[in-house]
Image (tube, rainbow, N blue to C red):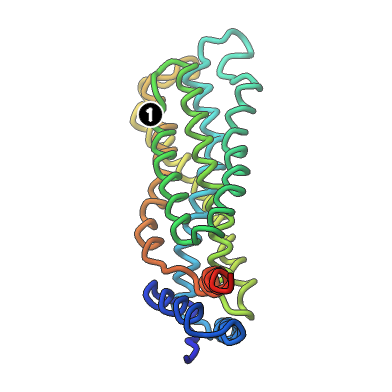
Amino acid sequence: MSTNPNPILTNEAARDLSLSLSLSLPFRSSSAMALKVLYALDAAKIQYYHFKAIIIAGMGLFTDAYDLFCIPPIMKLLGRVYYEDKPGQDQYQIPRVVLATMLGTALLGTVIGQLVFGRLGDRMGRRHVYGISLILMVFSSIGCGFSFCRTKTCVLVSLGIFRFFLGLGIGGDYPLSATIMSEFANKKTRGAFVAALFSMQGLGILASSLVTMVVSKIFEAAASKNLSWKHTPEDADIVWRLILILGAVPAGLTYYWRMMMPETARYIICVCVCVCVFDKLQ
């Protein structure tokens, strides 16, 4: 069997490789064949699919950064909308306990998501779990924007719940994106490609600030007659919802391309094939 320098294997080729290594070859031959394939992947030249993988996987980290860093200015907007009736210096100010809780729920979900989706990625495959975490991010972003009710308590509770599930998806995206990129890359460029992948976080942070300023400026221009320092129009409630919903756009746009990405060859060789061979020996 000849080794393919392209580290992307189709699903059919992966099944054929797994079957041949586990059924028709002894254990030593299977190990030698796996090492040859891994060596070919490490020695593969830089090709178009490397940069395609950076964009596809990087859009997940772009969305992660957008969703995590857009919430501080949104809390300012929530203070203007729902804490306008507070007296004195507390007007427009969200209590610290509420603020810390709202900021921490997504981070708590991120920690849990990294542990859960990272483990599932090793057991079920990167590609399948990748899609699950992305769908969770998309629907949670939309849910954050459509937080139930218009009362202060109801909005904050529902927003916190959706932010927690959003954190789960974000946490799953971190280990899977980094792992997929490292498994696609060859030995010489692996560090550079992973660094390029995580540079998308900076773009996501920048985008969250730009989107917040642009949406707020558009609202200010449209409602300039009703704006004042002492009164916030009810339409301002739309601004923060729109900013959160826009976070689902880049994730939704990359879902198709993520599902078109086959399973990584290194996962097939190091996990699927080894498990098949071990089960055969048992």
Position above or below: 216 against 87: below
Judged from this view, the residue extending furthest toward the top is: 87
Position above or below: 105 against 118: above
**Amino acid residing under circle 1:** Ile
Q: Position of residue 258 (x, y in %)?
A: 41, 61
Q: Is residue 123 left or right of residue 19?
A: right
Residue shown at 52%/71% (left/top)? 276
What residue is shown with label 1?
A: 238
Judged from this view, the residue extending furthest toward the front is: 282
From where the camera sits, is residue 205 visible?
Answer: no
The foreground one among 267 and 192 is 267
Q: Position of residue 241 (x, y in %)?
A: 41, 32
Residue shown at 43%/39% (left/top)? 141
Quadrant in which the C terminus is drawn: bottom right
Mark 1: secondary structure: helix
The foreground one among 226 and 207 is 207
Position above or below: 86 against 14: above
Judged from this view, the residue extending furthest toward the bottom is: 2
Q: Position of residue 114 (x, y in %)?
A: 60, 49
Q: How many marks?
A: 1
Q: Position of residue 151 (x, y in %)?
A: 43, 15
Residue shown at 52%/85% (left/top)? 25
The foreground one among 7 and 100 is 7
Q: Is residue 206 left or right of residue 242?
A: right
From where the camera sits, is residue 242 visible?
Answer: yes
Residue shown at 47%/91% (left/top)? 1
Q: Residue 144's image quarter?
A: top left
Q: Badge 1, how many Cα within 10 Å: few under 14, some, many 20+?
A: few
Q: Residue 271's image quarter?
A: bottom right
Q: Is residue 72 left or right of residue 162?
A: right
